[in-house]
């Protein structure tokens, strides 16, 4: 019997960097497949379109998360009329200060797309092969098939097709999917249907509503995640987009440095660049405070961001 090919571990090709490669820093890994999940009316489509505008324009997603890799985006919105999709994209482009007319977001305009049908799979693969998008957004999963989402045997082939699409065409794939109403589990565990959906993702984003505030969490296969970042849908005509809510700094004891001063102090003491996670752990601060401090320090030029992390601009 013919044996399978093998290679000794030390002979495997080395990674170009020990740092994760990002499509959108902290939110979506380069060429990742994954889920944008949440209960109905939690802003999943707005978040998916924000990713699309960021990748197509190279601007920070949610005006906060840098996008080091940019290019075309291919989008299929199964539930919204094309004029609604255009209106939302225009609003997000306005919030991001991006020229909408030159935005490289391409919409698939067929009335239905069924990923469990071979002819539709072939047509989508041909479209991806022609446009070569950096990101493919499919919204939502429930409108893209006629299978039973609770059966792993039926879900697995569909997910395998999308994984093959990603590998063959080197494109990231974001699949919008619903979570169960009122679920209290972790974001991935609350997704409707087979657990294969949660396990499939390289990068997953989850939205939950608490009162009038949305909370964004992320999970990554090869990088630290983000926990409960507060968001809100902000209207400032013509802009209409999700924005990160910056909470007031916590009350500190007299003489203790502010969050911004503490982050700058840690970077000043460091001999190498520090990641967001390292700064959060050393400062013992909430993620949102670290993100806000780094954004202000970077904008002011006091801190420089690189592939290795953040360092003081000495």
Image (cartoon, rainbow, N blue to C red):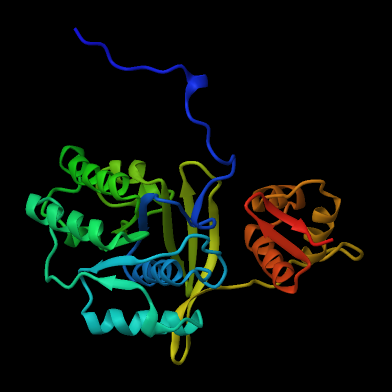
Report whether 274 appears left or right of 210.
right
Q: Quadrant of the N terminus?
A: top left
Q: Quadrant of the C terminus?
A: bottom right
Residue 101: which quarter of the image?
A: bottom left
The residue most toward the bottom is: 237
Residue 193 image position (x, y, % from top left):
24, 48
For residue 251, above or below residue 228 = below
Residue 300 image position (x, y, % from top left):
75, 73
Residue at 34% from the left image edge and 71% from the top image edge: 41
For residue 7, above or below residue 128 = above
For residue 53, above or below residue 219 = below
Looking at the image, which is closer to me, 23 or 170? Answer: 170
Residue 147 image position (x, y, % from top left):
12, 49
The residue most toward the right is: 255
- Number of marks: 0
Looking at the image, which is closer to me, 7 or 178? Answer: 7
Looking at the image, which is closer to me, 216 or 169? Answer: 169
- Is any part of residue 120 visible from this angle? yes
Residue 295 image position (x, y, % from top left):
67, 68
Report whether 19 appears left or right of 171.
right
- Is any part of residue 42 visible from this angle? no
For residue 230, above or below residue 309 = below
């Amino acid at each position: 019997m013919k044996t399978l090919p093998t290679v000794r571990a030390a002979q495997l090709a080395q990674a170009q960097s020990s740092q994760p490669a990002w499509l959108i820093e902290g939110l979506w890994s380069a060429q990742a497949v994954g889920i944008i999940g949440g209960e109905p009316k939690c802003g999943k489509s707005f978040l998916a379109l924000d990713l699309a505008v960021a990748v197509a324009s190279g601007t920070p997603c949610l005006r906060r998360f840098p996008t080091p890799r940019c290019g075309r985006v291919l989008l299929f919105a199964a539930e919204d009329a094309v004029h609604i999709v255009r209106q939302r994209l225009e609003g997000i482009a306005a919030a991001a200060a991006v020229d909408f007319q030159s935005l490289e977001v391409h919409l698939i305009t067929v009335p239905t797309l069924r990923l469990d049908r071979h002819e539709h799979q072939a047509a989508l693969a041909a479209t991806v092969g022609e446009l070569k998008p950096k990101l493919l957004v499919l919204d939502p999963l429930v409108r893209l098939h006629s299978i039973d989402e609770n059966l792993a045997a039926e879900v697995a082939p569909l997910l395998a097709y999308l994984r093959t699409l990603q590998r063959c065409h080197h494109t990231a794939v974001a699949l919008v999917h619903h979570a169960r109403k009122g679920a209290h589990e972790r974001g991935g565990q609350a997704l409707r249907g087979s657990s294969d959906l949660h396990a499939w993702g390289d990068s997953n984003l989850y939205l939950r509503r608490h009162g009038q505030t949305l909370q964004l969490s992320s999970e990554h296969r090869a990088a630290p995640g983000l926990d409960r970042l507060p968001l809100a849908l902000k209207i400032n005509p013509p802009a209409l987009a999700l924005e990160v809510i910056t909470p007031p700094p916590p009350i500190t004891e007299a003489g203790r440095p502010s969050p911004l001063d503490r982050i700058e102090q840690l970077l000043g003491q460091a001999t190498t660049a520090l990641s967001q996670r390292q700064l959060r752990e050393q400062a013992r601060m909430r993620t949102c405070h670290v993100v806000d401090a780094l954004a202000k320090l970077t904008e002011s030029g006091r801190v420089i961001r690189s592939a290795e992390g953040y360092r003081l601009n000495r």
